[in-house]
Amino acid sequence: MATGPTNLLLEHVRNLLGETKLRQLTDRQLLDCYISQRDEAAFAKLVERHGPMVLRVCQRILHEPHSAEDAFQSPSTNGGLPIWRAN
């Protein structure tokens, strides 16, 4: 069994392959992965794609940076996820 640096290299390669796969998925596919498997990497990719836009909408509506950040990260009753992440 491989140990040390070899394990780190294998983990890095797996991460790169996973990232490539995630990049190819549609938003709907990523959302399905997150909902059905609680795939955090799929959710992170959605946040990477859409988080900045959602934050800008919060900023435009609230006109106060701290309130916008709070709204962006605010937990809802849907599993403790921020409201915008629930749908």
Image (spheres, helix red, strand yellow):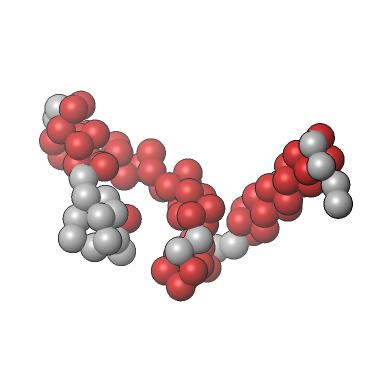
| Residue 29 left/right relative to 85 | right
Question: Which of 40 and 65 lies nearest the eye of the viewer?
Answer: 40
Q: Position of residue 60 (x, y in %)?
A: 20, 36
**To which quarter of the image does residue 22 belong?**
bottom right
| Residue 51 falls in image quadrant | top left
Which picture quadrant has residue 80? bottom left
Relative height, residue 12 to residue 66 (above, below): below
Q: Position of residue 50 (x, y in %)?
A: 41, 47
Drawn side of residue 23 relative to residue 64, left or right = right
Say which residue appears at 81% left-offset and 42% top-offset: 3
Q: Which residue occupies the foreground of this view, 20 or 58?
A: 20
39 over 69 or under it: above or below: below
Residue 42 shows up from this direction: yes
Residue at 48% x, 49% y: name it: 44
Q: Number of numbered discs present?
A: 0
In x, y percent, where is residue 39?
Answer: 50, 61
Q: Position of residue 4 (x, y in %)?
A: 79, 36
Q: Residue at x 21, y 50 (%)?
A: 75
Camera-side residue of 6 and 12: 6
- Give 31 or 64, whichever is nearer the viewer: 31
Horizontal side of residue 67 vs 37, given as left or right: left
Residue 9 seen in the current view = no
Give the residue drawn at x 29%, y 37%.
56
Q: Is residue 65 above or below residue 9?
A: above
* Quadrant of image for the C terminus: bottom left
